Image (cartoon, helix red, strand yellow):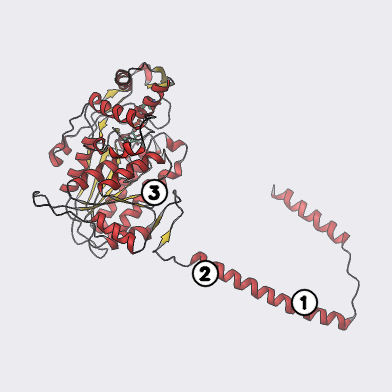
Amino acid sequence: MSQLKTMALGDGLASNSGKFKPEKPLHHHHRAAHLHRWHQQHCVAVWGLLAIALLIAFFAFSPRPSTPSRRHLSSPHASWGGPLWEKRVQASARIRPTSSSSRRAISVLVTGAAGFVGSHCSIALKRRGDGVLGLDNFNDYYETSLKRSRQALLDRAGVFVVEGDINDANLLRKLFDVAPFTHVLHLAAQAGVRYALRDPASYVRSNVAGLVSVLEASRSASPQPAIVWASSSSVYGLNSKVPFSESDRTDSPASLYAATKKAGEEIVHTYNHIYGLSITGLRFFTVYGPWGRPDMAYFFFTKDILRGKPISIYEGPDHSTVARDFTYIDDIVKGCLASLDTSQKSTGSGGKKRGPAQLRIFNLGNTSPVPVGELVSILERLLKVKANRKVVKMPRNGDVQFTHANISLAQRELGYHPVTDLQTGLKRFVKWYLDYYSPHSLVVKKVSSIGGLSS
Ligand SMILES: O=C(O)[C@H]1O[C@H](OP(=O)(O)OP(=O)(O)OC[C@H]2O[C@@H](n3ccc(=O)[nH]c3=O)[C@H](O)[C@@H]2O)[C@H](O)[C@@H](O)[C@H]1O
């Protein structure tokens, strides 16, 4: 290739020199004056260009003011900064004094607040008097209108959701400057095991770089917050020993999603070790319920069953079943709040560790796995529509054959006791789904029915 290129260049030069026609000779003085003018003009042009280049370099590389600011992130509406914005942040993050509770109220920064688990947790925290500030980039991984509806609910509950990205270090620094959060509930992430085949970079951006960004801001904050964050049952990967326990090995992930969550668990270890951040990781097991994620099977199965479209039900080798430890959202919310309440304080200050800090990891599952075929049967009964089932071999797309949580550690340390079986939880989901997507359901009606959200 390079030889061909060289040959072509050589050929070009040879033929050019052969065709070159010199200009007519100029009179000597005339030529000198012409050269002088040429020199002057070109000097001006060169200096002009240099000045423009310096200006471009200055604007491209100089640090930007952090407030007020407008970021072109996943959402064109992303903007933050200014006195009014700061007041809203402070009001939302402020603890509401209550005389009744013996519990010390907390002020929590919830990342991914317009997401499924984030919105439920934010409302539950706000209801019990805690300060809550949401952060979400409203990306379009799934329908943004659903995120906006959740945001409307949060707004009514008194939770302000800042529109911004966890990778925006200036924004995070500003938030910690404006409000002294005692805790961070870090739920912002790129979710979904199968989507990683389509957009692997988004997992690295959110689940690795984004996590580090949140940890960096937290370790520098004064006071340092305690952190509770979402890991995943997917870290158990191809393990075959059930139920899955926190002490089991987690070094055979089946998807990039799982690998980034596992990476997160290692990353938080270093921040705990070096900076004294108190950190609790929660391995969620297939969380479902009202206001859920449209990319999850129970959600799009419901949509497809109602439209009469075929649904693919995965099966394992030799027609074995694929099963999940489906966990209802309200049980997950209780686990998240208990984790926040039992978090010890971070021990660092001024970016330095001052003593050993708490580091925990818990399974939050339902501890009763259900085959996917059974999930579909429950949906059929609730929807009163027969599904068009296509049983297919589970593709190698990131899925694992089964999950099953051992929750004894969470029971012991958090008082976590899931109470919702799949039938009950799906009944609530279907009720919400039919209401939310009903053609007669007005947006106002949707956002006013706060009861569906972590009631
Ligand atoms: O616990 C987690 O940490 C993860 O839970 C969730 O992943 P999963 O447990 O895989 O849930 P989900 O996709 O709803 O598939 C459910 C079942 O349907 C089967 N499935 C799926 C698609 C399909 O077309 N057919 C099918 O049978 C499929 O094989 C599976 O058995 C979250 O999405 C993920 O973000 C992460 O949080």
Q: Foreground: 1 or 435?
A: 435
Quick one: label 1, few (<14), some, or many (20+) residues within 10 Å?
Answer: few
Q: CA distance from mark 3 to mark 1?
A: 55 Å
User: At numbered mark 3, what does the secondary structure look like: helix, strand or loop?
Assistant: loop
Q: Is residue 65 visible?
A: yes
Q: Foreground: 6 or 177?
A: 177
As displayed, is residue 124 above or below residue 404? below
Q: x, y percentage for residue 430?
A: 30, 27
Quarter location, residue 148: top left
User: At numbered mark 2, what does the secondary structure look like: helix, strand or loop?
Assistant: helix
Q: CA distance from mark 3 to mark 2?
A: 29 Å
Q: Earlier in the sequence, mark 2 or mark 1?
A: 1
Residue at 31% in and 39% down: 447
Q: x, y percentage for residue 102?
A: 8, 50
**Residue marked by disc 3:** 137
Quick one: label 2, few (<14), some, or many (20+) residues within 10 Å?
Answer: few
As displayed, is residue 345 above or below residue 45? above
As displayed, is residue 207 above or below residue 429? below
**Residue marked by disc 1:** 38
Residue at 23% in and 63% down: 349
Amino acid beneath label 2: Phe
Q: Earlier in the sequence, mark 3 or mark 2?
A: 2
Residue 295: give its label. none
**Residue marked by disc 2:** 58
Q: Earlier in the sequence, mark 3 or mark 1?
A: 1
